[in-house]
Amino acid sequence: MLDNMVTHSGQCHCGAVRFEFDAAPDLVAWDCDCSICAMKRNTHCIVPEADFRLLQGEQDLSCYKFNTMTAAHLFCKHCGICAFYRPRSNPDGYAVTIHCITSPTVRSVEIRKIAGSNWEAAVEQSGIRGLSHPRQQAAAAAEEAAAAAAEGGPA
Ligand SMILES: [Zn+2]
């Protein structure tokens, strides 16, 4: 866990599904207008798989898929709440519904709009894809900077 991280925890409405994840106390959340996010009013933050832990309720989850079948829209089969899921933008990570975080660990939430209704363009421009592997992205940036420095030129 990085220095600036805290452990957030959350659950579905009935409490059968419980989870926690490590992230900064200041979260970035995505307000998406694709067909399913619009209906669910789903505002979510992206969490790398390595930073997410399902604490209980694996057997209480059901899954809905549609269209490209990439996203796994997980929800509690008792109360119907989608506390987290595997998003199409980041299928190697999780999207956590910010309103399902129940710990007092969130200092702020920056809401960013993403036009999922125009999916390809919106996702490529948003930078959301890198968020499920931020360490990888940071390492690549550092490598690029080092290579540029070695060449003696500006980055
Ligand atoms: Zn539930």
Image (cartoon, grey):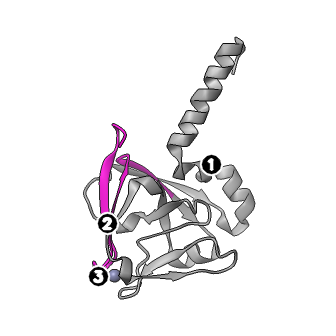
Nearer to me, 62 or 99: 62
Q: Which residue is mark 3?
A: 14
Element at label 2: strand
Residue type at tag 1: Gly
Rendering quadrant holding ligand 1:
bottom left
> To which residue does mark 2 refer?
10
Q: Amino acid at mark 3?
A: Cys
Question: In the rendering, at what x and y percent does residue 52 appear?
Answer: 39, 58
Label 1 sits on residue: 127
Cα separation between marks 1 and 3: 34 Å
- Contact flag, marks 2 and 1 (Cβ < 8 Å): no
Above or below residue 13? Residue 5 is: above
Q: Tell me which residue sits at (71%, 14%) in the image.
A: 151
* Inter-mark Cα distance, 3 to 2: 11 Å
The residue under the point 29% across, 82% down is 14
Instruction: State the extent of the magenta-drawn residues as a range.
Output: 1-29
Question: What is the x, y in percent for residue 4?
Answer: 35, 39
147 relative to 51 in the view: left or right: right
Q: In the image, 52: left or right of 123?
A: left
Q: Is residue 64 left or right of residue 148?
A: left
Disc 3 and disc 2 in contact, CB within 8 angstroms: no
Furthest-left residue in view?
104
Where 4 sits versus 119, above or below?
above
**In the picture shown, does residue 6 fall above or below 83?**
above
Q: Residue 123 in the image: state x and y as whole percent.
A: 67, 57
31 vs 98, left or right, is right
